[in-house]
Image (spheres, rainbow, N blue to C red):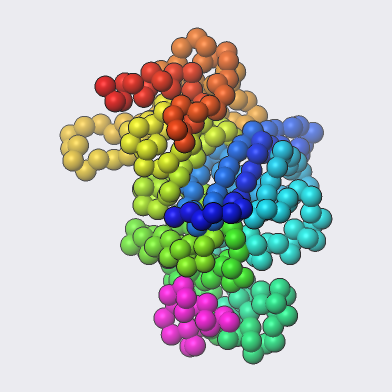
Amino acid sequence: MTTAGTPALRVRDLNVTFTGGGREIRAVRNVDLDVARGEFVALLGESGSGKSVTARAVMGLTDEYTRVSAASLDVAGTDILALSEEERRLMRGERMSLVLQDALSALNPVMTIGNQIGELFKVHRGATRKQARAAAIELLGLVGIPAPNNRVDDYPHQFSGGMRQRILIAMAIALEPEMLIADEPTTALDVTVQAQILDLLGRLRDQLGMGVLLITHDLGVVMEVADRLAVMYAGRIVERGDADTVLDLPAHPYTQALLRSVPDAAARGHDLLTIPGSPPSPAQTPPGCSFNPRCHMAIDICRTERPPLVDVAAGRASACHRSEELLHELVS
């Protein structure tokens, strides 16, 4: 589902560089991202690919040893890079929000859930204590916490992992932001609870009309909820497009390799396909295409020239010298 108007998120040429220890390490390179209002976009990649660094750069949650630059970084039409730190702080929660994967660490263990949620309304809305408590109870009910009137005074350790994740989501949507970034929100949860959290995010997306950027390494999650998909490898987006199309007909060997590595219950007696080698360190990316040392389709040009991210079909883009061959191979 998409709605007309200003995009919830528009990123152009985002670069993130770590500068600690007297070195400069480029962790994110030339990333472009768009998320429309009411749209679910997944940012998929292995650990260390730069997904979470991208999310924190957009949110302005980087440290003094991290340099962020971009041609444009707009949330709901506001240029984030042009804001002061105080203005950006006020935007967090108000117009853009982040759901982290480790709910127990993200929540304050010595504050009740009601006080933690209510604090948002006191700071951003000037709510009284009574108003903040009522808003917290309403939000707990919205995200599916049973008997919210009774649970509002409980502490984080009194909730299950799935319920704590729901509480984090409640805090993230409390002020009805236009843009929500969910960073691996279901990683530590079992499959049943994971499905419930994804369903909750989808319902809230529809109800509030916000854009959602889902950071994940899990193809099953992408298949479940994503409208569009961007695949990230070694700090760059290597493929993007409509999620169903990309998953059915990948135009990049890395995306194809990820799909082939998914276990198939019907393929008994066959070895599980894996991607050889490991992703490169951001400090030592190979020349040419970063995936070339692991790629079964790599040829000489792949080892010397970095392929740009270019359109390969309507609404599809891939950064591979052999995208056309790969697509032809898949459809023939």
Q: Position of residue 241 (x, y in %)?
A: 46, 38
271 on left or right of 71: left
**Residue ID at (55%, 39%):** 48
Q: Can residue 18 be spotted in the picture?
A: no
Q: Position of residue 144 (x, y in %)?
A: 43, 75
**Residue ID at (47%, 79%):** 141
Quarter residue 203 falls in: bottom left
Quick one: which residue is furthest to the top in this view?
300
Task: State which quarter of the image contains the C terminus.
Answer: top left
Q: Is residue 140 magenta?
A: yes
Q: Position of residue 226 (x, y in %)?
A: 42, 49
**Residue ID at (43%, 48%):** 227
Q: Nearer the viewer, residue 159 or 297?
A: 297
Q: Position of residue 254 (x, y in %)?
A: 43, 29
Question: Against 96, is 44 above or below?
Answer: above
Quarter residue 243 falls in: top left
Q: Is residue 332 magenta?
A: no
298 on left or right of 78: left
Question: Against 85, is 227 above or below?
Answer: above
**Residue ID at (64%, 55%):** 76
84 on left or right of 41: right
Quarter residue 27 falls in: top right
Tell me the magenta residue range: 135-151
Q: Can residue 146 be spotted in the picture?
A: yes
Question: Against 87, is 133 above or below?
Answer: below
Question: Against 56, is 110 above or below?
Answer: below
